[in-house]
Amino acid sequence: MPTPATAVGTEGARSGVRARLASSVSVLRERRGLQAVLHTLAANVLIQGINVGTGVLTARVLLAQGRGELAAIILWPQFLAYMLTLGVPVSLVYHIKRHPDMQEAFTAAALVVGVVMGLVAALVGVVGIPLWLHQYSAADVLQAQLLMAIAPVGLVSVILFSAIQAREAFGYYNLFRYLNSILVLLALVLFALVGRLTVATAAWAYMLAGLPAFAWNLWWVRRHLRPSLRGARAAAVPLLHYGLRAWGSDLLGTVGDQLDRLLVVGLLAPFELGLYVVAQSLAGLVSFVPNAVIPVLLPKAAGRTTGEALSTVGHAAGRTCVAMLVLGVPLFAVGDHVLRIVYGTTFAEAGTVFRLLLVAAVLSGVASVLSQAFLALGRPGIVTLLQGLAVATLAPLLLVFVPWLGLVGAGAAVLGSTAIRLLVVALLYARARRQWTASPHAASLEGA
């Protein structure tokens, strides 16, 4: 029989082996996560480059007036579709990671919700667009109403992307994303070459060019997740329970992301709106960093303990901030020249608002990454409150500053609202870290 000393030694050796294995698994996870982030980052660079190309093409052909009209027309199908997600996309990621044995039922339930709410979005758009675009021509209003037919496809696409994200198939995830951007650019170039690039044809190019990628995406999800209605009704209950709590975040996030455009459509002339859209597009170049981190971060953090999730998100936020500053500082310095050379002398007036929006983009990226900690810990209500704060501060700031300062006022309002949001999310994150540090073995925050 082994002596007590031998038994203790054996158990110690086993504990050492387990610790080394756990450490190896952790390192492997980190490496895979970093690879996924870098792959997504590379895809975002390509996508941003393509988007700059489409922006330059439409701005030079349509000029500021036409670019403003185009922005107003294509805003509504995507905006209304994202407004009516019911929080299902993020809920699908969370539940597939937590219950992979039920992925078929969860995916099917999510797709059914997507189709139904997409149809609701289309109906709301057709009825509401004449009221929202009352300053625009009857032809522009009609085009915007017709484009609402694509809203169900847009909402289902978001859910399909979430399913791929949950499976951590980031190679396909990125492929589908930049395929859509490439097709949009090709369609716009084709219309330009034949002399048919107008506001209407550009709008349809943006909306319809994504259909091939959507079909391929749908085939991939059907093959790899095999959605099945068996058990879908039961899966819909937890899916919507989490989703409706997260929906406030989606809803307010969508409103917050587009609220500036929604309000300046009524507060600024189409020419000024065109300047604002171009400045916002150029400032958004730095956003490809957080946009690469967040899709990878949520599924990575959702399956971990409270301490691991908080640490993972904190490190990601710090690295995101550094990367955005490295890109943003030079762009801040030469932004005026870029606007003049790339988009044309007409857009040189957007230099000041561009700088304000660029700083806001950096702050927003860090805030969005930090917010993933609360989604990963099953507390989407906190993210909803943060998004609500952003909307509650942005709307009045826009209504005050835009009539007072015009185009620059819009940028100042966005920057002020974003700074407040970052301050609050940083304080909440720090509080969560202190709570866990004080009692690391207590019940986790998850499900609270």
Image (spheres, rainbow, N blue to C red):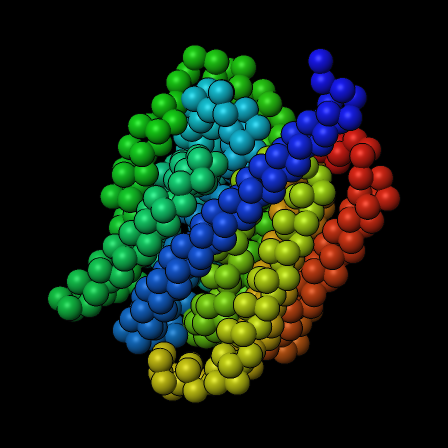
The answer to whether residue 93 shows anywhere in this view is yes
Nearer to me, 429 or 37 = 37
Nearer to me, 236 or 402 = 236
Task: Classify residue 153 as left or right of residue 232.
Answer: left
* In this view, 428 is above or below 348: above
Task: Classify residue 130 as left or right of residue 425.
Answer: left
Name the image quarter holding residue 360: bottom right
Nearer to me, 357 or 139 = 357
The answer to whether residue 151 shows anywhere in this view is no
At a point 27% along the width and 57% down the height, the residue shown is: 182
Location of residue 344 in the rendering, given as x and y in whole percent from the top left corner: 35, 83
Q: How many marks?
A: 0
* In this view, 26 is above or below 325: above
| Quarter of the C terminus within the rendering | top right
**Farthest residue toward the left?**
194
At a point 38% along the width and 27% down the height, the residue shown is: 225
* In this view, 412 is above or below 145: below
At a point 36% along the width and 23% down the height, the residue shown is: 226
Location of residue 301 in the rendering, given as x and y in whole percent from the top left corner: 60, 42
Task: Classify residue 59 as left or right of residue 7.
Answer: left
**Farthest residue toward the right?**
438
At a point 58% along the width and 62% down the height, the residue shown is: 320
Location of residue 51 in the rendering, given as x and y in whole percent from the top left corner: 36, 64
Name the image quarter holding residue 407: bottom right
| Quarter of the N terminus within the rendering | top right
Task: Classify residue 153 as left or right of residue 208.
Answer: right
Location of residue 75 in the rendering, given as x and y in whole percent from the top left corner: 44, 54
